[in-house]
């Protein structure tokens, strides 16, 4: 068990579950995001109906997640009241749980099990979507990418629960 896993196992068990607030699918590159109430997470591929699901199996970027709290921070940095999650082109918006603290760990959402992988850095298209400064505002607030470990249905309102490693006594 790594030092990070030991730390998480010791201090994060009290972490409350989060909640899925929004789900979006990107059927094609540069096309509008389709907002849905539920999506089928397909093991090793992505969300059914999302263009990433058609890609190579095993990619670390099968699903993208972002905290609603980070969207609020991006809006504040851009001096806006709100930002439509579809503009950010992430798949799942969650609230009430710190995804960044769970990087490299697994989370369960509905019937699906995901492994949080890399930071989801903003692309230069955020300047067009959000206006001048959009890319900079998203820096360190862009969310995380994830792989799907177990297929299952994900719905708006589902709990987001961390699956933490068990701490060893030795």
Image: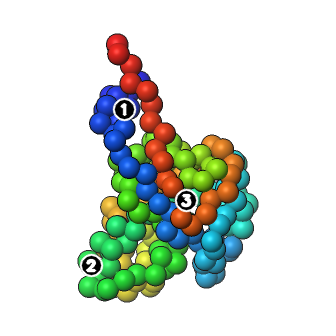
SS category of the residue bearing label 1 = helix
SS category of the residue bearing label 2 = helix
Quarter of the figure with the C terminus: top left
Height in image: 18 above or below 103?
below
Quarter of the figure with the N terminus: top left
> Measuring 49% from the left and 53% from the top, which residue is drawn there?
160
Height in image: 57 above or below 64?
above
- Give residue 57's position: percent from left, percent from top: 70, 48
Residue position marked by numbered label 2 in the rendering:
76
Instruction: Estimate the spatial distance between the alpha carbons at disc 3 and disc 2, rounded to whole Å.
Output: 27 Å
Q: Which mark is residue 136?
A: none
Which residue is most to the top?
170
Q: For label 2, count other residues whose C-alpha is less than 10 Å away and answer few (under 14), some (14-19) or many (20+).
A: some
Mark 3 or 2, nearer chain start: 2
- Give residue 30's position: percent from left, percent from top: 60, 79
- Give residue 139's position: percent from left, percent from top: 33, 66
Disc 1 and disc 3 in contact, CB within 8 angstroms: no
Residue position marked by numbered label 3 in the rendering:
158
SS category of the residue bearing label 3 = loop
Q: For label 1, count other residues whose C-alpha is less than 10 Å away and answer few (under 14), some (14-19) or many (20+).
A: some
Please tell me whether mark 1 or mark 3 is closer to you in this view: 3
Left or right: 19 in relation to 16:
right
Left or right: 42 in relation to 170:
right
- Give residue 90's position: percent from left, percent from top: 52, 68
Residue position marked by numbered label 1 in the rendering:
9
> Measuring 34% from the left and 67% from the top, which residue is drawn there?
69
> Measuring 66% from the left and 44% from the top, which residue is drawn there?
150
Height in image: 167 above or below 40?
above
For this rendering, which residue is in front, 65 or 28?
65
Instruction: Estimate the spatial distance between the alpha carbons at disc 1 and disc 2, rounded to whole Å.
Output: 33 Å
Mark 1 or 2, nearer chain start: 1
Please tell me whether mark 1 or mark 2 is closer to you in this view: 1
């Amino acid at each position: 068990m790594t030092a990070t896993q030991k730390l998480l196992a010791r201090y994060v068990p009290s972490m409350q579950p989060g909640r899925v607030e929004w789900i979006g699918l990107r059927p094609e590159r540069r096309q509008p995001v389709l907002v849905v109430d539920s999506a089928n997470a397909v093991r090793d591929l992505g969300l059914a109906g999302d263009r990433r699901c058609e890609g190579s199996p095993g990619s670390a970027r099968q699903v993208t997640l972002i905290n609603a709290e980070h969207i609020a921070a991006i809006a504040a940095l851009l001096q806006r009241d709100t930002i439509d999650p579809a503009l950010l082109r992430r798949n799942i918006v969650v609230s009430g749980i710190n995804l960044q603290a769970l990087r490299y760990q697994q989370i369960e959402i509905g019937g699906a099990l995901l492994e949080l992988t890399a930071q989801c850095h903003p692309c230069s298209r955020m300047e067009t979507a959000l206006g001048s400064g959009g890319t900079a505002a998203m820096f360190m607030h862009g969310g995380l990418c994830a792989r799907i470990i177990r297929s299952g249905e994900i719905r708006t309102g589902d709990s987001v629960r961390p699956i933490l490693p068990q701490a060893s006594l030795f």
